[in-house]
Amino acid sequence: MAAPTILLIGTADTKSDELLYLRERMQFAGATVLVMDVGVLEPGTFTPDISNNDVAVAAGSTIEAVKNAGDENKAMTLMALGACTLAAKLQCDGLINGMLALGGTMGTDLALDVAAALPLGFPKVVLSTVSYSHLIPPERITPDLMMVLWAGGLYGLNSLCKSALSQAAGAVVGACISAQPPKASRPMVGMTSLGKSCLSYMTTLKPALEARGYEVAVFHTTGMGGRAFEALAAEGQFVAVMDFSLQELANHLGGSCVTSGPDRLRGAGRVGVPQLVAPGAADMIDFPTWGAPPAGYEEAPAHAHNRLIASTTASADLRRQIAREIGTRLAEAKGPTCLLMPLKGVQAWDLPGEPLHDAPALAAFVDAIQTHVGPAQLQALPVHINDKAFCDAALAVFDEWVAKGLVPKGSPT
């Protein structure tokens, strides 16, 4: 791509100087820039390519009506709706190749909505005074979003904020030039796992599926990975999924911040994508190593994976709740579904001698799975999830679905 077109979003009423500087930096890097004004106060010092009234009209309103909405939150929520509508259409029509938005809390709130309205793999950068802040809930962050802290940029240009502005400009232009949008040459299988030390089946399954003519994408289920997996599954990007790490669902039910939201284990089922499922790592609750465990688990056994993430073993009662929820979500699926239940354990640290081993709780989990998952969807396996026999069973079901035409045949190279 020789000359990408970048959609630049900001409030021209308060940040004209910054928008003009960003435009100049991106043009210097060889990009064409479309400026979208999402401000609701006085006009800026330049004429944007997309006016604030254009944005308001896209939200089914006018800029005057937005100004009279009653308060700034209502006004910017309307502008966010219009900005999302216009940005999505520009992207769908192939008129833009990337997005850069800037703002304080107000502009960031809007920018997060616009980023979510654009597809995964489309370059998107947010330059914000609250980048990486605890004010931003994880569910508002799209999995592929890049953020740059706008240091010293609350009001007016200075050498410090110019450094951040120019880096953001270079980041989005560079991403557009070097990006390779997902274009699978073979049918793609989506797979979930939790690292390699906790769950290792992908080391066997990935090459086996590739030999059958499939591309395999493995998602790290630490919150954002599951969010990306669910979004792509719901879009029908996978011909089948091997969703073998459900600990984000366990985290969500157990009150952990390491969650991908309330819709985990629903994306593929809702659109009928064939799904092979296993409750990998669903017997533990994750938490930040540097923080406190979830309420009620302060005294439970724990394993520190590194200085970022640790895990504690889920109680038998919580495991029963997790099993019930798994059964409910699988029953809602519109496509072929099979749950593989490894009877000897669901992650590396639950083996005898490991810190999260709890045989009675595992037995309660197995019993609850067998109670809440229909027999037509369930295969109980006398193995551990990291055993080769688990992979053999998964491939046997997958091959059967291919033979029946439920999953498209692979395309060997």
Image: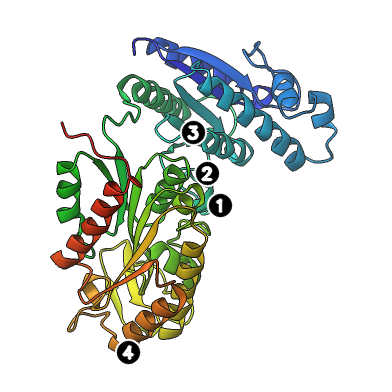
Image quadrant of residue 355?
Answer: bottom left
Amino acid bearing label 1: Leu
Q: Which element type, helix, strand or loop, lies under badge 2?
A: loop
The numbered mark, 3 or 4, whose residue comes first in the sequence reads: 3
| Mark closer to the observer (4, 1) | 4
Inspect this view and state whether residue 280 appears. no
Neighbor class of circle 3 (other Cα within 10 Å; few <14, some 14-19, many 20+) is: many
Inspect this view and state whether residue 104 appears. yes
* Residue under the image location 71 percent in, 21 percent down: 52
Amino acid bearing label 4: Pro
Q: How much space separates mark 2 and mark 3, taking CA atoms?
A: 9 Å
**410 versus 321 height, above or below:** above
Left or right: where 333 falls relative to 393: right
**Residue at which label 2 appears:** 130
Neighbor class of circle 1 (other Cα within 10 Å; few <14, some 14-19, many 20+) is: few
* Residue under the image location 26 percent in, 48 percent down: 403
Neighbor class of circle 4 (other Cα within 10 Å; few <14, some 14-19, many 20+) is: few
Circle 2/circle 1 CB separation < 8 Å: yes
**Residue at which label 1 appears:** 135
Amino acid bearing label 3: Leu
Image quadrant of residue 14?
Answer: top right
Q: Quadrant of the N terminus?
A: top left
Circle 2/circle 4 CB separation < 8 Å: no
**Residue at which label 4 appears:** 360
Q: How much space separates mark 2 and mark 1, taking CA atoms?
A: 8 Å
Q: Which element type, helix, strand or loop, lies under badge 3?
A: strand
The numbered mark, 4 or 1, whose residue comes first in the sequence reads: 1
The x, y position of residue 375, in whole percent, is: 40, 72
The x, y position of residue 120, in whole percent, is: 43, 36
- Give me the disc on residue 376: none
- Give me the disc on residue 127: 3
